[in-house]
Image (spheres, rainbow, N blue to C red):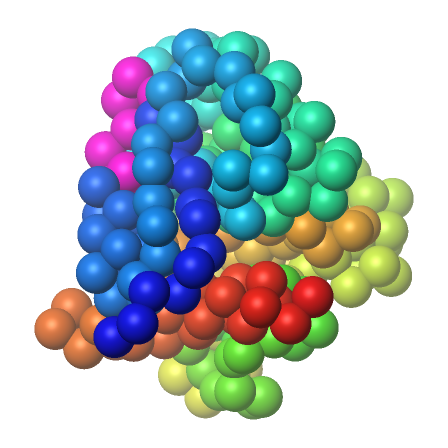
Amino acid sequence: MKNSGINAGITVFPGSNCDFDVFNVLKDIFNINVSFIWHKDKIRNYDDFDFIVIPGGFSYGDYLRSGALAARSRVMDSLRNYSEKGGIILGICNGFQILAEAGLLEGVLLTNSSLKFECGDVYLKTFNYETPFTCAIEKDRVLKMPIAHHDGNYFAPERKIRSLIKDKGVIFKYSDIEGKISADSNPNGSLLNIAGISNKRFNVMGLMPHPERASEMLLGSEDGGGIFKSIIKYIKER
């Protein structure tokens, strides 16, 4: 397949463990040029990247709170500037936690209501198809992706939740296989079954499920690939 001509960066923190998963999916499945960004580095030329992914893992061993130390790493200053310039940032699992701790996304990720590490497949319903992360996802398609986290319980104050809903910033919710939203389909106690949100400009998104682990049928689902296809479509059409 022809190279997409798109360049992506993947941040790497001590404790990141999904960085190579994302790298392989972007490079081998979607033919994107990919490079790693070390947490101590400063991004000097923002035009080098069409989008940046903060992958999952246990950055800094999840000391203090998940994502709290990584949110204060040098590279996050660059990512704040990148987002302010309209750069696209996707945070997956620990990446979502880091974005929340850094203030790039609203709310916090608390310990799962079960007080256990939750690992397994979940179903997701998309609530906004007009973002760089969802514009290529088939309407009304229920997505299947895996989760693997201890702190995925999304919470935000009521006024911020109202604002998220008003601004269409709730992107994904946990559902059953038919797309029904219920307590039974919520794996971690997340408020309103929220699985993924964006900022007001829709150029920064975080989600707890792992799309990179659901981008080829060899792993049981290609549904996560819809997020990467959306980013590619958005970049090519803007």
Where is residue 44? Give x, y as percent: 56, 21
Residue 93 screen position, x and y as percent: 41, 43
Residue 175 highlighted magenta (yes or no): no
- Image position of 39 (left or right of 171): left
Residue displayed at 42% across by 11% down: 40
Residue in the image at 39% along x and 27% along y: 37
Above or below, comparing residue 219 to residue 151 in the picture: below
Q: Which of the pair 192/9 is nearer the observer?
A: 9
Left or right, 226 with reference to 150: right
Residue 65 locus on image (x, y percent): 47, 19
Residue beneath the point at 16% across and 68% down:
219
Residue 169, placed above or below residue 38: below
Residue stretch in magenta: 13-19
Judged left or right of residue 164, residue 149 is: left
From the viewer's side, name the closer residue of 2 and 115. Answer: 2
Per the image, is 17 magenta? yes
Position in image of residue 43 (x %, y %): 53, 22
Quadrant where the C terminus sits is: bottom right
The quarter of the picture where the N terminus appears is bottom left
